[in-house]
Image (cartoon, rainbow, N blue to C red):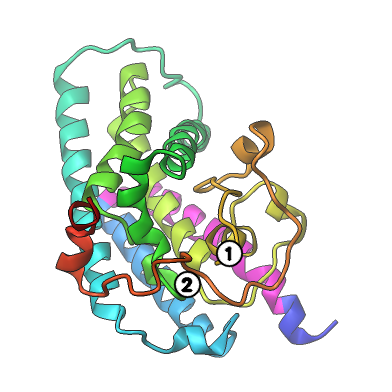
Amino acid sequence: MSIHKYLSFLIYPVIFFGSTAAIIFFLALGYSTTFSILFVQALAAIVVFSLELLMPYKKDWNQSQKDIITDTIHYFVNYLIKQVALLLYAFLIENFIFFGVWPIDLPFTIQIIIALISIDLFLYIVHRVSHYNNLLWDLHSIHHSSKRLYWINGEKRHPLHQILEGLPGITFVMLLGAPKIVVITALGILSIHMMLQHANIDYSVGILKYLFAVAENHRLHHRLEHSQVNFGAMLMIWDHIFGSADLEIERVEKVGIYGLEQFPTQYLLQLFWPLKKK
């Protein structure tokens, strides 16, 4: 087996599990969630970007298609939406009494896993429904309009769809009484996974593809020919349970949406695309 092949199996577990461990380690040392998550996210982004240049899945996906500025705006707008949501979450969880059934006595890492599984279920449901409901699809089609996959467009979403997709899961764990630090950490870990899920890196994960919604699975969701499979944001368990998993890994040459080849590339035009379509 070549060195390249060995490296390809290490990329996801080293970056994802290493980043997760680093965030938890910094928190254990007493650093703030803001510093712990942002610092590790920044390092992960630098590593992922570098690997896209060194080990691209498709070399032409590293070339701009008039999308970098727009995708960057999407990234930061949706990042701000998350921060506002987390501030609201902190206010509500600290000032109102919810069911209080969250297992706060369990180790912090286990609580994060429970939060990720719960949030991922609702992300799966909204994502899948968005492919069949016309109104939601008009919003979600922005994410599928990309003609290439690379780390930054994992956060390419219409702001309304970002809210609709994230609200149910966060509300669910809030009603259970999940501490804010658990939810903030879980979402920080999820964002690093999203980088790797859309990264233009030629990596494989072996049997981990049955559990995690990694790039080799998710590219099948974005392929031009068919996209009604592999809806999981982070995990594949819901795809297995609800019959939407496709693990027949194949080379994906083109991504996007048939019939929408002329999808606007400017941010504001994409923002008002659903209205224009109507």
What amino acid is labelled 2 in the image?
Leu
Point out residue 56 in the picture as x, y percentages from the top left corner: 57, 84
Q: Determine the image quadrant of residue 219.
A: bottom right
In depth, the one of 210 and 11 nearer the eye is: 210
Say the numbered circle drawn on residue 149. Answer: 2
Please name the residue shown 36% across and 24% down the image: 172
Q: Is residue 111 magenta?
A: no
Q: Tell me: residue 75, above or below residue 90.
A: below
Question: Is residue 204 found left or right of 95 in the rendered image?
Answer: right
Q: Residues within 10 Å of mark 2 (few under 14, many from 20)?
A: many
What is the secondary structure assignment of the residue under circle 2?
loop
Q: Residue at x 43, y 50 (%)?
A: 190
Asked if the residues shown at circle 1 and circle 2 are in contact, with their CB atoms under 8 angstroms apart, the answer is yes
Mark 1, Cα crowd under 10 Å, few <14 / some 14-19 / many 20+, is many
For label 1, the residue is: 219
The residue positioned 61% from the left and 77% from the top of the image is: 253
- Amino acid on which the number 1 mark rests in the picture: Arg
The answer to if 13 sits in the magenta stretch is yes
Residue 9, image x and y in percent? 71, 69
Query: Where on the picture, by quarter, is residue 88?
Result: top left
Q: Does the magenta stretch mainly form a helix, a strand or a loop?
A: helix
Question: Which region shows up in magenta?
Answer: 7-33
